């Protein structure tokens, strides 16, 4: 009895089709993708912090790559973010301070939104340049909890927990939070809030009590931020680059250096890459279709999350 060859043929054809689409995608990516420009002796490195801040590693990896480069005269940190997790925001803050200690001038440039954890990062920079309509501020810390015990009772659902200590299930949604638990959370919030205020006071050269008056969680426009001392001047990215060049003593035209997409192997495209944190879908949705479907930031997100 002869074996049916069609399953094998169809499998081979399917593989060839997949490889064909992959090759076409890689070719389009290579043609349309922007590749790293040449660093000149008057270059100012522009680094993005976009979307919700959850991981400092991509930023620090790029910073470490270029901070010792003598042709990179200064750095501009372009912030377009509603904030994020406390730890990564502090990691980036510390990395910027180390770069400045190593001799690099660093200027912050605000996009549409630079609030909360994004402002924490900006406080590490030598100067802050913002558009007048930028939303910034939101200096504070917040944690949110929900008590769904009434819903569980209505649905006749019982929740149980086995724990090693009295506070291991602190914030559990199936019961009210006790006064002792609220005190623990409030103490932690106050501690991190104090860290935030001290970082802003140090970075902006403001008295701690002045920062305390500004840091009540409210948001400010860029114009308001310049007036109250949370930013230095109004302007866009090019203004921030020029300012960074001046601080670094650049003679002549300042060149903006933006590390961009590199040639990648097809499996790198399909899986994403930590350097640009973008996969093939995200790349084509923006470059080919003109859509930004990946990493869309929230408009207003109060507090470090």
Image (tube, rainbow, N blue to C red):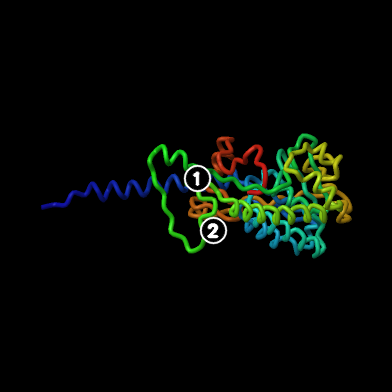
**Distance from the alpha carbon under mark 1 to that under mark 2:** 52 Å
Residue at the far front in the pictured view: 179
Closer to us: 172 or 301? 172
Q: Is residue 171 left or right of residue 193?
A: left
Q: Position of residue 76 (x, y in %)?
A: 77, 51
Q: Position of residue 181 (x, y in %)?
A: 58, 54
Looking at the image, is mark 1 or mark 2 earlier in the sequence? 1
Mark 1 surroundings: few (<14), some (14-19) or many (≥20) residues within 10 A: some
Query: Which residue is labeled 2 in the image?
Result: 167
Mark 2 surroundings: few (<14), some (14-19) or many (≥20) residues within 10 A: few
Secondary structure under tag 2 reads: loop
When asked about the image quadrant of residue 220, the answer is: top right
Closer to us: 115 or 247? 115
Seen at 72% across and 54% down, the residue is 38
Closer to us: 264 or 143? 143
**Residue 251 sits above or below residue 131 on the image:** below
**Residue 266 sits above or below residue 213 on the image:** below
Q: Position of residue 190 (x, y in %)?
A: 70, 53
Seen at 51% across and 55% down, the residue is 169
When asked about the image quadrant of residue 40, the answer is: bottom right
Q: Which mark is residue 249?
A: none
Q: Position of residue 85 (x, y in %)?
A: 63, 52
Q: Is residue 149 left or right of residue 137?
A: left
């Amino acid at each position: 009895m002869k074996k049916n060859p069609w399953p094998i043929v169809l499998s081979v054809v399917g593989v060839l089709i997949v490889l064909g689409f992959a090759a076409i995608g890689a070719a389009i990516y290579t043609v349309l993708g922007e590749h790293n420009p040449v660093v000149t002796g008057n270059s100012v490195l522009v680094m993005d912090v976009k979307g919700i801040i959850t991981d400092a590693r991509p930023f620090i990896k790029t910073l470490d790559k270029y901070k010792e480069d003598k042709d990179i005269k200064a750095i501009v940190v372009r912030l377009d973010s509603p904030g994020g997790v406390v730890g990564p925001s502090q990691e980036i803050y510390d990395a910027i301070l180390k770069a400045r200690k190593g001799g690099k001038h660093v200027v912050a440039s605000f996009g549409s939104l630079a609030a909360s954890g994004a402002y924490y990062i900006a406080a590490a920079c030598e100067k802050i340049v913002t558009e007048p309509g930028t939303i910034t501020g939101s200096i504070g810390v917040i944690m949110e909890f929900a008590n769904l015990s009434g819903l569980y009772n209505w649905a006749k659902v019982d929740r149980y927990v086995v724990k090693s200590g009295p506070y291991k299930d602190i914030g559990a949604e199936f019961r009210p939070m006790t006064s002792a638990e609220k005190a623990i959370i409030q103490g932690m919030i106050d501690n991190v809030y104090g860290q935030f205020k001290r970082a802003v006071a140090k970075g902006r050269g403001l008295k701690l009590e002045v920062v305390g008056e500004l840091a009540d969680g409210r948001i400010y426009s860029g114009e308001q931020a310049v007036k109250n001392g949370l930013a230095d001047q109004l302007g866009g990215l090019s203004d921030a680059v020029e300012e960074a060049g001046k601080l670094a003593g650049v003679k002549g035209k300042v060149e903006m250096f933006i590390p961009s997409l590199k040639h990648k192997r097809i499996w790198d495209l399909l899986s994403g890459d930590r350097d640009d944190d973008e996969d093939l879908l995200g790349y084509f949705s923006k470059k080919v279709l003109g859509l930004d479907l990946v990493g869309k930031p929230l408009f207003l997100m109060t507090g470090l999350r």
